[in-house]
């Protein structure tokens, strides 16, 4: 048998027998409804077929072309974070009943997925200290875009105001989404310590905005004054949206919901979802109960069955595209279900104490690194505000050049901010997590010291 | 302690939690005196209220038990029409977890991520060949985001020509994401009726098509599983008035290797890697919705694109006419990887065989079931077939009941009540992954249910009878939403 | 099954979109018909305008939802919203049980009672739904 059909049970004999039962002679007859003129006369120009053994060899070779893992010390963050995930997480999500099932439209035979999402929703509410969470969005950037659209539905002002310390790719995404629906996007500046400037926010909101948006910790790693900015937003009749791109921080930081945020959304991949070159990731969105009917995406609710047993169903679906079509709260259908499950399992294993300890660990290492780099000759720390696990260091030479130089020495020292902020040529965004041992941090300091 | 059995409902994580338990500890701090770094208390929380406390084996049991409450493609036929539930090759899970891929940080300097970039480049080339388009973006995270991306590119194209148009035409048989995506992209949606065959009514289209129509959004084969045979004429009508033809490629698996959207007059289309190219559905995602365009739309592709320069691969951000980004980084790379592995494993002949067998299986089911079940449209089927419950009207048994009863026979139900143009629709897509024996078992179950519906309709109306829970109260769930667990009054259990 | 054999009080006026209006002076009480609620099934949510909002004859003023469908509701006459049925937020099922009395949606101060002339009597409405369901 042709090896290319190892995923297809029907043998040639089966196919011929079935064709006869249908009353057709040739396989080609199945496609009679496709005009002759459109039918391909030649085989597709794609590589393959490969046996499984060849396939594994091919991919192993391709994976080796990604050179970052050959013993390199990495300090990359900027919207994606390197974290350790206990082995049980992957073992459990590779249960075929989870990963090869569909959206739980038939609750009787999908209680596993439905209950897990209900638990995920609860965990997100607990972390953010808000009332409701949806079942996931694509990623942090599109979650922000959807959150802004939600704010505009709930509080229509035709305009949103964003901190200039948001992840630049989140801003780009928000601009793409909002450019088509006539919602203005404006930005406000930051203070010398690196945090969003409440006065600038107050001025920029001026005549009104549906939402004020900050990121906490912000893109440069600084912790924001959430309560102050919530007051600024609310005084001007705007909602406060807090973006969290590194949710491990919620292990020690106050839930932004308690601090006045109306919506907390962001990126959840840090909870056990592999980096995988940036996707699939996990957008999350939580909000106060008042936004229930405006929420985009799926929601799972608790109910009971005809025999009185507790169970879970997709609910409030009239918000969604398959019912409300052009009037839906969003076009989202497929979301990131398995990544939400991954996060739920990760958070269950870490638990109350584990997540807190992990967060403390991240913060302490990053602080240690920040102080170590502050004392390196030629380096300085431009922003004084408290941080979580990321900070900016100004180098004696352009950061992109430093990345190339240290790359040769087995270190990826961070993200040059010039990638997003022309003019910040010498600034490097450094991220330190539990996967960076002290020895790596010390080596980073030594190597950066050689640049001056 | 109450006795329990294997089909009992599972408690919630939060109910299983007990103070003092833990399933994880970070490695010992190796930095001196970490306590000196403590954050100011105005930033910090003391506790995460209600957060679970469980040991590792308890977590493992909890999720393993939950998993057993799910149906899955590896348990049997999963005939959800338009969802394409096909076998997800196991090797893909191994490949996606190769440390070089799974551990690649998206902010890596390009020279350290050549393997990932080359894979994205090669997948794009393969999709170009399969679809006959000029370029693809892999960025959209799912089909709906692909639709939105494609429509936004069309909008940018019209705007740049100084011809802002207002309307997107969508057939009444379309998936709900189509109108939702068009509105999100700033358009007004007009529905166009289907003809007696369930296809686009070419005359109605001709009458409606004008200079204010930006795009016709067409699913081909459509949601009835029928190929729009007049697609070339449709494209001519749309193009003659300056409009663009968008093809929803959710059903591309029906003709891979047989025909190509790019040869049909399609200007832009998305496809779903989690459908045609077998990446796992994951209980609702992640997916991936690459979008293919013809040359005239290429300038509007989202940033960045992957470009090959000599033997190196790089990301190109500098695209002034681009619509921008629709998400962070480069898309669901893990899904790109699995789809590319699938294409390589099958090769040209295997891909065509995939489509052929999917269509063969659907037609085999149709042939066996059409003497029993009502077939509202009799146009030739490709990869799926739509029946209705009309023949059981007198028995008072409806599509929902048939779907629920299928569970008692060990099958996941088909897609029900969609497309909307068929009352009581049952949309069946078997895919190429099913053996003839599995199809026959499904056919036998459908026959039995039909007999039962006539003989003992109450039994069918109260199905399922064998599942862990039955007929959940969705009305109650929507009237009084409970969307999270909360600690019972009186405080946490000791 | 005949669709017209529901209950359609003679003292009400009906719209093509299946709303009813009861007129007392220049105040109109508006709801949806027995037929509308039975077509929708179990109603789970009602969206109503704020008191003081202006509504326009023939235009949408809110919506009524079941688990799987949303139905917009249209004002039978123009005017200002005087009162909405707040009890429906807690028990939307009232519309299913009692569409004409406890299940009313809103009361409006009508701007022009002449607008009601285009509406149907109970007999005309019964015929209308017979035609629509055929």
Image (spheres, helix red, strand yellow):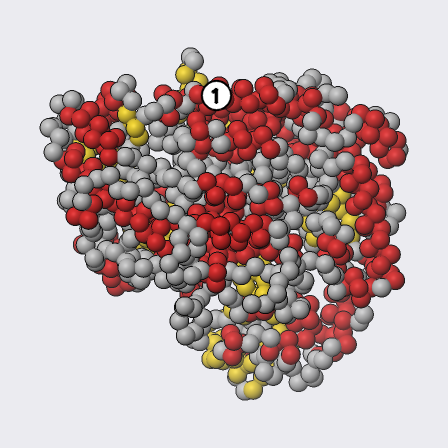
User: Residue most toward the bottom?
Assistant: C25
Q: Chain of mark 1?
A: A
> Vertically, is B396 above or below A413?
below
**Position of residue A393 in the picture relative to residue B251 (left or right):** left
- Split into 4 quadrants, where in the image is the N terminus of chain C? bottom right
Question: In the rendered image, which residue does mark 1 sit on?
Answer: A62
Rendered location of residue B93, percent (x, y): 55, 33
**Number of numbered labels in the structure image:** 1
Residue situated in front as seen by the camera: B414 or C40: B414
Rendered location of residue A303, percent (x, y): 57, 66
Residue situated in front as seen by the camera: A233 or C61: A233
Identified at 63% across, 20% down, the residue is A51
Residue B255 appears in which quarter of the rendering? top right
Rendered location of residue B454, percent (x, y): 87, 61
Rendered location of residue B329, percent (x, y): 40, 35
User: What secondary structure is found at the residue carrying circle 1?
Assistant: helix
């Amino acid at each position: 048998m042709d090896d290319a059909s190892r995923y297809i049970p029907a043998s040639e004999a089966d196919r011929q027998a079935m064709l006869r039962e249908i009353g057709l002679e040739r396989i080609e007859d199945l496609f009679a409804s496709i005009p002759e003129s459109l039918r391909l006369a030649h085989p597709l120009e794609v590589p393959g077929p490969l046996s499984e053994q060849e396939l594994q060899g091919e991919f192993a070779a391709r994976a080796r072309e990604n050179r970052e893992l050959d013993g390199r010390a990495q300090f990359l963050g900027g919207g994606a974070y390197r974290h350790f995930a206990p082995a049980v997480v992957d073992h459990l999500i590779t249960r075929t009943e989870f990963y090869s099932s569909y959206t739980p439209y038939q609750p009787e035979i999908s209680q596993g997925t439905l209950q897990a999402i209900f638990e995920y929703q609860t965990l997100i509410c607990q972390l953010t200290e808000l009332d409701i969470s949806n079942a996931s969005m694509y990623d942090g950037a599109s979650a922000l875009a959807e959150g802004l659209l939600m704010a505009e539905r709930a509080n229509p002002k035709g305009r949103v105001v964003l901190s200039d310390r948001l992840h630049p790719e989140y801003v780009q995404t928000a601009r793409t989404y909002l450019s088509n629906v006539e919602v203005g996007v404006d930005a406000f500046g930051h203070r010398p310590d690196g945090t969003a400037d409440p006065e600038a926010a107050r001025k920029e909101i001026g005549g009104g905005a549906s939402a004020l948006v900050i990121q906490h910790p912000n893109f440069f790693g600084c912790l924001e004054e959430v309560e102050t900015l919530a007051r600024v937003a609310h005084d001007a009749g705007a909602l406060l949206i807090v973006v969290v791109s590194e949710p491990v921080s919620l292990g020690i930081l106050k839930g932004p919901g308690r601090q006045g945020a109306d919506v907390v959304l962001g990126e959840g991949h840090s909870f056990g979802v592999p980096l995988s070159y940036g996707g699939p990731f996990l957008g999350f969105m939580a909000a106060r109960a008042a936004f229930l009917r405006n929420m985009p995406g799926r929601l799972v609710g608790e109910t009971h069955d005809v025999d009185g047993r507790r169970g879970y169903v997709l609910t409030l679906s009239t918000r969604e595209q398959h019912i409300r079509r052009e009037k839906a709260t969003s076009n989202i259908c497929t979301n990131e279900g398995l990544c939400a499950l991954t996060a739920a399992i990760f958070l269950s294993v870490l638990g109350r104490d584990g997540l807190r300890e992990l967060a403390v660990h991240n913060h302490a290492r990053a602080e240690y690194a920040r102080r170590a780099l502050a004392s390196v000759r030629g380096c300085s720390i431009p922003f004084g505000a408290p941080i979580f696990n990321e900070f900016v260091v100004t180098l004696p030479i352009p950061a992109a050049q430093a990345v190339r130089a240290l790359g040769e020495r087995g270190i990826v020292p961070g993200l040059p901010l010039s990638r997003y902020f022309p003019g910040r040529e010498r600034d490097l965004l450094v991220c330190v997590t539990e996967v960076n041992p002290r020895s790596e941090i010390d080596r980073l300091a030594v190597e950066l010291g050689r640049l001056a | 302690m109450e006795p329990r059995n294997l089909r009992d409902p599972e408690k919630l994580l939060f109910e299983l939690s007990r103070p003092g338990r833990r399933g994880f500890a970070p490695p010992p701090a190796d930095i001196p005196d970490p306590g000196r770094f403590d954050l100011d208390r105005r930033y910090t929380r003391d506790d995460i209220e209600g957060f679970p406390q469980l040991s590792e084996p308890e977590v493992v049991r909890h999720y393993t038990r939950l998993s057993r409450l799910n149906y899955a493609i590896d348990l049997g036929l999963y005939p959800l029409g338009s969802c394409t539930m096909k076998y997800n090759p196991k090797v893909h899970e191994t490949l996606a977890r190769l440390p070089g891929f799974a551990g690649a940080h998206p902010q890596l300097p390009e020279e350290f991520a050549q393997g990932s970039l080359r894979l994205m480049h090669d997948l794009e080339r393969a999709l170009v060949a399969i679809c006959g388009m000029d370029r693809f973006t892999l960025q959209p995270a799912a089909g709906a985001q692909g639709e939105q991306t494609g429509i936004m590119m069309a909008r940018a194209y019209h705007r740049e020509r100084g011809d802002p148009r207002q309307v997107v035409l969508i057939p009444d048989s379309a998936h709900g994401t189509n109108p939702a995506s068009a509105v999100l992209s700033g358009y007004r949606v007009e529905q166009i009726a289907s003809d007696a065959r369930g296809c686009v009514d070419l005359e109605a289209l001709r009458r409606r098509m004008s200079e204010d129509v930006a795009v016709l959004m067409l699913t081909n084969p459509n949601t009835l599983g029928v190929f729009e045979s007049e697609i070339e004429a449709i494209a001519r009508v749309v193009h003659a008035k300056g409009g663009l033809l968008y093809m929803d490629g959710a059903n591309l698996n029906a003709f891979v290797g047989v025909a190509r959207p790019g040869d049909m007059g399609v200007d832009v289309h998305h496809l779903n890697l989690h459908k045609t190219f077998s990446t796992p559905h994951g209980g609702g995602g992640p997916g991936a919705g690459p979008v293919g365009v013809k040359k005239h739309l290429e300038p509007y592709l989202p940033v960045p694109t992957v470009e090959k320069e000599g033997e190196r691969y790089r990301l190109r951000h500098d695209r002034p006419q681009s619509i921008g980004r629709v998400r962070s980084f480069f898309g669901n790379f893990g899904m790109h990887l699995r789809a590319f592995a699938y294409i390589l494993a099958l090769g040209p002949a295997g891909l065509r065989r995939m489509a052929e067998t999917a269509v063969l299986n659907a037609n085999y089911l149709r042939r066996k079931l059409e003497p029993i079940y009502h077939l509202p449209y009799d146009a030739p089927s490709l990869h799926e077939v739509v029946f209705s419950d009309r023949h059981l009207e007198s028995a008072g048994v409806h599509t929902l009941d048939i779907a629920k009863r299928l569970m008692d026979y060990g099958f996941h139900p088909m897609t029900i009540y969609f497309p909307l143009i068929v009352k009581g629709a049952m949309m069946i897509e078997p895919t190429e992954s099913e053996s003839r024996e599995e199809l026959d078992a499904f056919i036998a179950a459908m026959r039995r249910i039909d007999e039962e519906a006539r003989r003992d309709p109450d039994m069918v109306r109260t199905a399922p009878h064998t599942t862990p829970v039955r007929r959940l109260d969705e009305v109650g769930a929507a009237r009084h939403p409970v969307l999270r667990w909360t600690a019972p009054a009186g405080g946490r259990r000791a | 099954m005949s669709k017209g054999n529901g209950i359609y009080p003679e003292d009400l006026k009906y719209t093509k979109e299946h709303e009813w209006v009861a007129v007392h002076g220049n105040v109109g009480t508006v709801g949806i018909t027995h037929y509308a609620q039975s077509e929708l099934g179990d109603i789970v949510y009602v969206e109503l305008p704020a008191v003081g909002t202006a509504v326009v004859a023939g235009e949408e003023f809110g919506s009524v939802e079941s688990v799987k469908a949303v139905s917009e509701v249209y004002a039978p006459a123009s005017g200002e919203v005087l009162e909405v049925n707040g009890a429906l937020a807690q028990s939307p099922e009232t519309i299913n049980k009692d569409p004409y009395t406890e299940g009313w949606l809103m009361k409006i101060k009508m701007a022009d009672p002449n607008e009601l002339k285009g509406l149907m009597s109970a007999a005309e409405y019964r015929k209308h739904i017979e035609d629509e369901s055929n």
